[in-house]
C-alpha cells in the first residue's frame, strides 16, 4: 500500500540567504515540518533550557555550536520514524561533515530527496544580516560565521552533489520569486508525492 508524503529536503546556504523565510514557506506549501536548529536553540535559550543556554554562548560569538550538542537535539526530534517519513525541511542542519554523516544514520531508511544550495553573494548576505539586527548579528560574529560557512559548510555542497541530490537555486530576488524558483527545483526532483 502506498501513502502520500512530502519531500525530505535540506536547505544549505549562508546565513542571511533566506533559508529561514523560505523554509517556513516550503513547509506550509508541502504540509511538512520545518526544522531550524538555530531557532530550536533560540527557543530553548529563551525558555532557560540548559542545552539552549549552552548553545547561546557559541551563537553570540558566531561560532558553531559543538556537533555533539546539535546532533543530540536533532536526534531527539527525529527519534520516531513517523517524524521523518512524511517529509521535512531542514534549515541550518547539517552544517559540518560530521553532522551530515550523523544525519544519514538518523534517517536510515528515509533518505533525503533534495538538497538545495540557496545561493546569494556574500556582500548581499552581509547587508541582510546587518539589517535584520538579530542579537547575534554583530560585525565580528557575521564575519566569523561566513568564515565558518566556507570552511565547514560549503564542502557539503560537493558532498551532496556527488550523491546527485544537489540543486542550486538563485536566492536573489523578491521572496515570491525565490519561492517560485524553489518550488520549481523541488518539483523537478520530487515530481509527485509518492511512497
Ligand atoms: P541560524 O538560525 O541558522 O542562523 O543559526 C544561528 C546560530 O545557531 C549559528 O550561528 C550557530 O551558532 C548555531 N547553529 C545553528 N545550527 C547549527 C548547526 N547545525 N551546527 C552548529 N551550530 C548551529
Image (cartoon, rainbow, N blue to C red):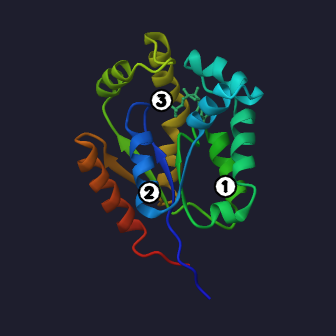
Q: Is ligand 1 within 8 Å of the beta carbon of the residue shown at mark 3?
A: no
Q: Is residue 91 above or below residue 66?
A: below
Q: Secondary structure at mark 2?
A: helix
Q: Tell me if I can see residue 172 in this picture.
A: yes
Q: Is ligand 1 within 8 Å of the beta carbon of the residue shown at mark 1?
A: no
Q: Tell me which image quadrant ligand 1 sits in.
A: top right
Q: Is residue 40 above or below residue 180?
A: above
Asked whether the beta carbons under mark 1 and mark 2 sit within 8 Å of each other, the answer is: no
- Tell me residue 77's x, y (percent): 70, 50
Mark count: 3
In the rendered image, which quarter is residue 87 located in?
bottom right
**Residue to which mark 2 is pinned:** 28
Q: Residue at x 47, y 29 (%)?
A: 150
- Which callout, 1 or 3, points at the residue further toward the start of the chain? 1
Q: Is residue 73 above or below residue 56?
A: below
- Tell me residue 125's x, y (percent): 34, 27
- Which callout, 1 or 2, points at the residue further toward the start of the chain? 2
**Residue to which mark 3 is pinned:** 150
Judged by depth in the image, the label closer to the viewer, 1 or 3, is 1
Q: Secondary structure at mark 1?
A: helix
**Residue to which mark 1 is pinned:** 104
Judged by depth in the image, the label closer to the viewer, 2 or 3, is 2
For the residues labelled 2 and 3, the Cα–Cα distance comes to: 30 Å
Q: Tell me if I can see residue 166 in this picture.
A: no
In the shown orientation, is residue 16 left or right of residue 136? left
Q: Residue at x 44, y 31 (%)?
A: 15
Q: Residue at x 31, y 61 (%)?
A: 184
Q: Residues within 10 Å of mark 2 (few under 14, many from 20)?
A: few
Amino acid at each position: 500500500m502506498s501513502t502520500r508524503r512530502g519531500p525530505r529536503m535540506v536547505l544549505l546556504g549562508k546565513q542571511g540567504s533566506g533559508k529561514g523565510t523560505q523554509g517556513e514557506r516550503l513547509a506550509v506549501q508541502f504540509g511538512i515540518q520545518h526544522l531550524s536548529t538555530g531557532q530550536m536553540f533560540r527557543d530553548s535559550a529563551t525558555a532557560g533550557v540548559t542545552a539552549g543556554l549552552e548553545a547561546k554562548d557559541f551563537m553570540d560569538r558566531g561560532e558553531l555550536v559543538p556537533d555533539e550538542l546539535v546532533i543530540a537535539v536533532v536526534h531527539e526530534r527525529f527519534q520516531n520514524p513517523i517524524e521523518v517519513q512524511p517529509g521535512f525541511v531542514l534549515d541550518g542542519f547539517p552544517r559540518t561533515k560530521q553532522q551530515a554523516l550523523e544525519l544519514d544514520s538518523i534517517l536510515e531508511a528515509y533518505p533525503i530527496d533534495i538538497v538545495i544550495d540557496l545561493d546569494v553573494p556574500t556582500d548581499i548576505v552581509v547587508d541582510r544580516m546587518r539589517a535584520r539586527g538579530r542579537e547575534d548579528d554583530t560585525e565580528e560574529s557575521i564575519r566569523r560565521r561566513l568564515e565558518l560557512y566556507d570552511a565547514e559548510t560549503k564542502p557539503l555542497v560537493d558532498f551532496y552533489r556527488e550523491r546527485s541530490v544537489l540543486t542550486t537555486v538563485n536566492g536573489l530576488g523578491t521572496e515570491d520569486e525565490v519561492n517560485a524558483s524553489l518550488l520549481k527545483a523541488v518539483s523537478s526532483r520530487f515530481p509527485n508525492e509518492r511512497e
